[in-house]
Amino acid sequence: MRFLGIVALLLGLALGAQAESLNTVALTVDGRGEAQRQQALQQGLKDMLVRLSGKQQVLEQPVSEQALAQLDRWVTRYDYDGDQLMVRYDTRGLMDFMAAAGAPVWGFPRPQVLIWLVEQGTGRGDMVAGDHELREHLVGEARRRGLSLVVPEWDSQDRNAVTVADVRGRFDNQLLSASDRYSHELVVAAVLYEGSPTKVSWRVLQGNKTLDQGREESASIEQAVKTLVDAVTDQLAQRYAVASSASQQLTLLEVEQVQTLADWYQLQGFLSGLSGMRAVSLVQTSDQVVTFGLDFGASDSQLRSLLELSRQLRPCPDESVAGPQWRYCWRS
């Protein structure tokens, strides 16, 4: 029991650290007066609501007005840094508030998204990575939306593994092979075409499977980066954000090949951190098979999509049983 308590504590700390990375908003202010500060705090809360739901439409829902009416409840700290107001919000409290109101919540952990973004320009194209002038703008837009973005180093190892032509030409074998050196769950391949208008085409890959894709138009290349981040985040939130509903049923998830305590800890942490997961209980263990009872607040299809985010958890169905099964294998 003492060991399980320590594991639970470590799990809470790990998930708390992920939430910590999303709880602060930086806002530009033109003064330090009360009116400027209150206006910035309100805008920051709107940004936080979009970030925690994953959907810009949350600002049109009653929960947004209700949260703004209790602004002081959510602000835990603010500091000035030049013309920037750095505001920290109570993300856990906000997510509980949103879930109670039936609004969508995109919880933690969130998938790490590795992006291969090519700026085509007038030549052969450049990767938005390394010291590219758009890199910081890309990272800032991802931070605004709460997208856990991984930008490649674009060093000699990357250049030897993949080219901008591979991204543009959709040669995914090279792209996925080059991606192996980075920790990620999903890959985005995108190309910016500067012009009037500027266009960006993008795809979200999970292994060899294309989850989503699109083509957007913007007035400038900087706006196109923002549009790209918004489009990708909106699509991911559509897949992974959960609007909880009342349920008295548990889903029994059987996982084979859980060989060590480290495996169990990693699996338990992954399940507990899924959006819409109210509770994870250990039902049974035998040999290398662990059965969990999952109290999940949304549909089975959403739960299966969330389970796909794990690179170690894969379906291993019994071919003698018809239909979908909650039987998975753990791959260390």
Image (spheres, helix red, strand yellow):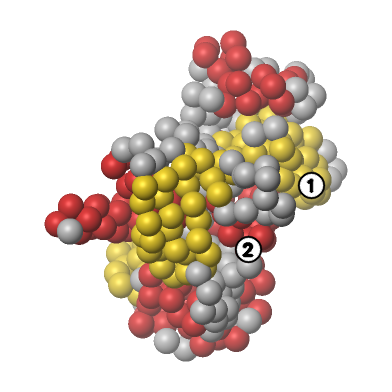
**Could you tell me which residue is drawn at 43 percent across and 76 percent down?**
96
Residue at the far left in the pictured view: 2
Identify which residue is drawn at 73% across, 40% down: 210
- Please name whichever residue, 125 or 232, is drawn nearer the observer in this view of the structure: 232
Q: Is residue 177 above or below residue 288?
A: above
How far from the left and from the top, in percent, is residue 60? 66, 79
- SS for callout 2: helix
- Label total for image: 2
Residue in the image at 72% along x and 52% along y: 322
Q: Quadrant of residue 292?
A: bottom left
Q: Is residue 328 in sight in this rendering?
A: yes
Q: Residue furthest front?
A: 320
- Find the distance from the CA under tag 2 to the CA under tag 1: 26 Å
Q: Which mark is residue 300?
A: 2
Specify the label residue 80 is tagged with: none
Does the image show residue 68? Answer: no
User: Which of the two discs, 2 and 1, labels the residue nearer the N terminus?
Assistant: 1
Mark 1 element type: strand
Which amino acid lies under the numbered mark 2 shown in the image of this protein?
Asp
Is 274 placed left or right of 202 in the picture?
left
The amino acid at mark 1 is: Gly
Q: Is residue 167 above or below residue 288?
A: above
Q: What residue sits right under mark 1 in the picture? A: 214
- Report if the CB atoms under discs 2 and 1 are less than 8 Å apart: no
